[in-house]
Image (tube, grey):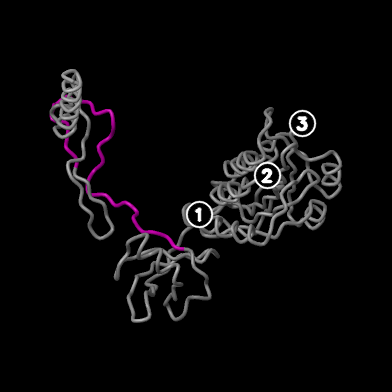
Amino acid sequence: MLCLYYYWLSVICYLLLVICYWRHPALRLRSGYSYAVPERSRRVEGLLVIFNAQCPMPNAQCPFPIPHSPFPMPQLQRLAINADRICDKSINLTPEQQHYLHRVLRLNQGDKFIAMDGRGHWWLAVLEAQETGLIASITEEIAVNRELAVEVTLMAALPKGNGFDEVVRQATELGVSSIVPVTSDCTVLKPSGQKVDRWKRIAAEAAEQSERQFVPTILEPISFDLAVKDCGQKKRYICVARGDNRHLWDCLIGLELPFVGAVPPCPPPGGELSIVIAIGPEGGWTDGEVKRAIEFGFEPVSLGSRILRAVTAPIVALSLVGAAFEKC
């Protein structure tokens, strides 16, 4: 019993020492330098103002740069809306959007947020309270340029389970323009209409989080043969796990873009160049599928010497596209 008493007493003393250590900057001095420790912060009109303690020693070398204060930090939340809900510089919020803004984000009357229609437009909006509920008034349009310089279509075979949810979410963050779910010879999943609606909601949420101008278009699942036949993109690539094929990166950096070196902003998606990348299911494409894709103008490419999962390969391919065309 006495041992247990001394054990808990030592734990409490240790915690008190840790608290004192972090509350007093002078205790953190080590061998001639000190850390820049935020003394206090204040939120003023959407700006986070931080006052930092300077290194007290004259020849101190702080391992991290001390930012000058005050400095602005983006604090505005984003909300995807339908363009048809905008009327006379007012946004008619749905009950779900009102709940999200007021109950989840804790916004009140007079607070500002960014409204985006998923078609390239951003607006600065102010929340207002009326008898019928909350509405938003548009104060100004915000000019942004967050999209890739090329239109990228992801043609992905449906993986097992809910793996396609992550494909939609991460592909949206990486700048894809449209996603075509396809059923191949090895596809097991049979998607329903509810699945498609779920993927569209995931794409809208991911576009909000990644601050995109456009929400990707999620098409209805179609067969592989119909997808490659109706493909209208200029550059077509099908990723093949095995074989002596060119790497996708070598294909992308070899493309000649007429707007490279032009004055920003970059041209809108779909203007000069459009790319489609086909990713297979678990087990990859069959030889017959690859042969039919080549007949319709697809070039077989490689993503490297390792075998990637069906939910990993789209992320790798789109990351390569982003690295090639992020800066036009």
Q: Nearer the viewer, mark 1 or mark 2?
A: 2
Check if mark 3's residue and mark 1's residue have beta carbons within 8 Å: no
Q: What residue range appears in magenta?
A: 52-79
To which residue does mark 3 refer? 242
The answer to whether one can see residue 229 in this image is yes
To which residue does mark 1 refer? 146
Near mark 1 (Cα within 10 A), the count class, few <14, some 14-19 or many ≥20, is some
Near mark 3 (Cα within 10 A), the count class, few <14, some 14-19 or many ≥20, is some
Q: Residue at x 67, y 28 (%)?
A: 306
Q: Quadrant of residue 288?
A: top right
Screen quadrant of the N terminus: top left
Q: Residue at x 79, y 51 (%)?
A: 224
Tell me which numbered mark, 3 or 2, is placed earlier along the sequence: 2
Amino acid type of disc 1?
Arg
How far apart marks 3 and 1 lie (CA) works out to 35 Å
Q: Quadrant of residue 282?
A: top right
Query: Tag 3's secondary structure?
Result: loop
Tell me which numbered mark, 3 or 1, is placed earlier along the sequence: 1
The answer to whether one can see residue 264 in this image is no
Amino acid type of disc 3?
Arg
Query: Tag 2's secondary structure?
Result: loop
Q: Position of residue 109 (x, y in %)?
A: 30, 71
To which residue does mark 2 refer? 160
In the image, residue 57 lies in the stretch drawn in magenta: yes
Q: Position of residue 236 (x, y in %)?
A: 75, 48
Direction from residue 26 to residue 240 in the image, left or right:
right
